[in-house]
Amino acid sequence: MTAFVGVSDMVRWIAQHGAAEIMAGMADAVEEDFRRWESFDKSARVASHTPFGVIELMPISDPDLYAFKYVNGHPFNPARGYQTVTAFGVLADVHNGYPVFLAEMTVLTALRTAATSAMVARHLARADSQVMAMIGAGSQAEFQALAFHAVLGIEKLRIFDVDPAASEKFVRNLGSRGFDITVCSSASEAAAGADIVTTCTADKAVAQVLTDADVTPGMHINTIGGDCPGKTELDPRILDRGPVFVEYPPQTRIEGEIQNVAADFPVTEFWKVLAGTAPGRTSAEQVTIFDSVGFAIEDFSALRYLRESVAGTSLAHEIDLVAAPEDPKDLFGFATAPVPVA
Amino acid sequence: MTAFVGVSDMVRWIAQHGAAEIMAGMADAVEEDFRRWESFDKSARVASHTPFGVIELMPISDPDLYAFKYVNGHPFNPARGYQTVTAFGVLADVHNGYPVFLAEMTVLTALRTAATSAMVARHLARADSQVMAMIGAGSQAEFQALAFHAVLGIEKLRIFDVDPAASEKFVRNLGSRGFDITVCSSASEAAAGADIVTTCTADKAVAQVLTDADVTPGMHINTIGGDCPGKTELDPRILDRGPVFVEYPPQTRIEGEIQNVAADFPVTEFWKVLAGTAPGRTSAEQVTIFDSVGFAIEDFSALRYLRESVAGTSLAHEIDLVAAPEDPKDLFGFATAPVPVA
């Protein structure tokens, strides 16, 4: 049988452990897997694009465990009552190829994206960072805020969204969690005085939600909304303000902020910073940019973290996804066995 | 909610409708989708290889429906009590990206593979074909036999497997279904006098389960076991005996029998035969070869056929694979909602 964690299980998991605590643990899991980057069989995700959205499969494997995620991105969905992003994922045993774990990942992806952002900022942002600006207060925003609080101790938030209702929702959701939140009327106002700027907007367009003039020395920029071809968030001049760190270059060059610059634009693979083979931040004045698009290793980490956490609990159900004939060569006998009438 | 058809549902579906009847209907569904080949967004499958097996994702999309299949192939599995191949698949709505249907596909793949073989043979084998040789009596064998019976009326079978227990299992499973079965002691003996030869063996090796001398004029060869790099079944000289028909050349040139011949070896895309833009069999003496590796459109057809058949019945269950927050932009509020203590 395959273990299954559905949406209601996921909500119960978060209620039991706390979103912040989960993301702190997940940040460590992602960091652990980034540190063993070279032990993974990696590939860029496989995308099926239409004018109104994208559906992607993101496979990844280490010598023992295979993972993949199904994820869509449909920016016009919220106007029709659907979410922009939904996802689910699977872990499989490399040794026999059997799927062993299936989980909803709409919520899990939100957790892992924020956990990854915070983990990277733990290494790239100035250690004395106190204020984070957030451009975009959509589905991902509260997760980012909580993860940065849990991992870096960030309490002061300056937020801006073109939709005032989104900012109101953000304040409503996080108001009681000890943050000092300032709702701003522009991205520039939000960025003023910020140590960290997180951009998480959903438009499938070459946008400039942050301009070069908004960027001040010492800032760490965590850009997560530019994550597919034709979808960017930064004024391209910002990319020349400091080193650009990426997850997996073959994917980021197609999908990230760097998709609009030269194919040989210099980037640093972030895992090398953890490995000590590439520099991270080298001064307090430096601007650091994490051009995040989301990579399959992060889903691998999130799925294995979830699986370990729910193993043996009532949060993991069994579903009969895999046929198990007594004689493995007799699939036909199994499939055509007489069935008792219900 | 997403509809789910698990293994036990699949077995009940087959008991209700009959494997042969299902494969006859599925052959029509696959043919229908092959006829609108150009309306699909196609790509070669994404494979993760290890020395002992492969895990693959097979995505495909038409303008309305997206499908993918997860499938493994681990030839050493049966010796350890596992199946060589397991699979599951998903259909998603292209318009909003939501997964709408999840199904076991270990059994469904066996049905669609045989349905596809029979559908292709309906167009390429001699209309007066009566005898089919089967090299390999493993998991796929009975499905092939039943599909060829349902679609082409084949009743006489000559089978050979290196493992006598497999042949015994084959006879046990099909003995009561009106076939005239001859168990042979070699592939050559099985092929003697056959109008159609189906090779379905599982070794991950460059094998020659059928030799050039076994091939006689007028034969249709349906080779389905050579389906990944390093895994072939035919004496390469057979490929020069007559036209070679394939599903999707970018995939077949890597995975099929033609992987060991020149990159420009001439092949006919089978869908063009259906479209009337390429010749099929042109004489009764011609040898025709279907170099089948299994293509994503076949899974698409099988999934949509299954989905339509079980819609509104007790065979499709709902599972909560996709989070559905009331406010699609408030995933956080949804994910952190208070949960009643069980």
Image (cartoon, coloured by chain):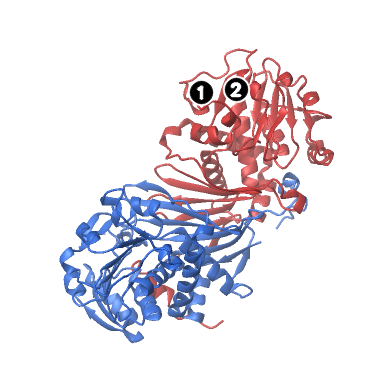
Chain colours: A blue, B red
Residue matched to label 2: B124
Q: Residue at left 52%, top 54%?
A: A41
Q: Amino acid at mark 1?
A: Val
Say which quadrant the N terminus of chain A sits in.
Answer: bottom right
- Residues under labels 2 and 1: Cα distance? 9 Å
In depth, the one of B185 and A214 nearer the eye is A214
Q: Is residue A309 left or right of residue A154?
A: right
10 Å neighbourhood of mark 2: few (<14), some, or many (≥20)? many
Q: Chain of mark 2?
A: B
Of the residues under marks 2 and 1, which one precedes in the sequence? 2
Residue B302's spot in the image, x, y percent?
56, 42
Q: Please tell me whether residue B180 is drawn above or below residue B60 in the rendered image.
A: above
Q: Are marks 2 and 1 in contact (CB under 8 Å)?
A: yes
Kindly indicate the quadrant of the structure image that contains residue A166: bottom left
Q: Is residue B231 left or right of residue A46?
A: right
Q: Chain of mark 1?
A: B
* Residue B219 is at least partly visible in this image: yes
